[in-house]
Amino acid sequence: GCSVFNVETNEELGKITDVSRTGANDVWHILFNGNEYLIPNVPEFVKEVNIEERYVKISVIKGMFDDED
């Protein structure tokens, strides 16, 4: 249920709705604009986690939340 924000722009990117445990790393299911996106919980992407305030900040790369190549 944590809100997800872009660490650089502070734009809200949705909410974590589920977590898949893959063995190598957890994968967060993020609901954004009616679509589900899968984001690996790895330091390259996850920059800040605040469970008490229920938010995380991630680094967004091209194509992560859209259909760009």
Image: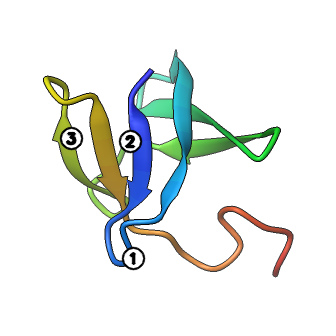
The residue positioned 46% from the left and 65% from the top of the image is 11
Amino acid type of the residue tagged 2 in the rendering: Asn
Image coordinates for residue 51, horizontal then vertical, percent: 19, 26
* Res. 43 visible in picture: yes
* Res. 25 visible in picture: no
The residue that label 2 is drawn on is: 41
Image coordinates for residue 1, horizontal then vertical, percent: 45, 20
Q: CA distance from mark 3 to mark 2?
A: 10 Å
Is residue 55 shown left or right of residue 52? right
The residue that label 1 is drawn on is: 9
Image coordinates for residue 25, horizontal then vertical, percent: 39, 33
Q: Quadrant of residue 58?
A: bottom left
Could you tell me if the residues under marks 3 and 2 are in contact, i.e. CB atoms within 8 Å? no
Sequence-wise first label, 3 or 2: 2
Count residues near mark 1 (Cα–Cα under 10 Å), then give few for <14, some for 14-19, many for 20+. few
Q: Quadrant of residue 64?
A: bottom right
Q: CA distance from mark 1 to mark 3?
A: 16 Å
Q: Nearer the viewer, residue 17 or 69?
A: 17
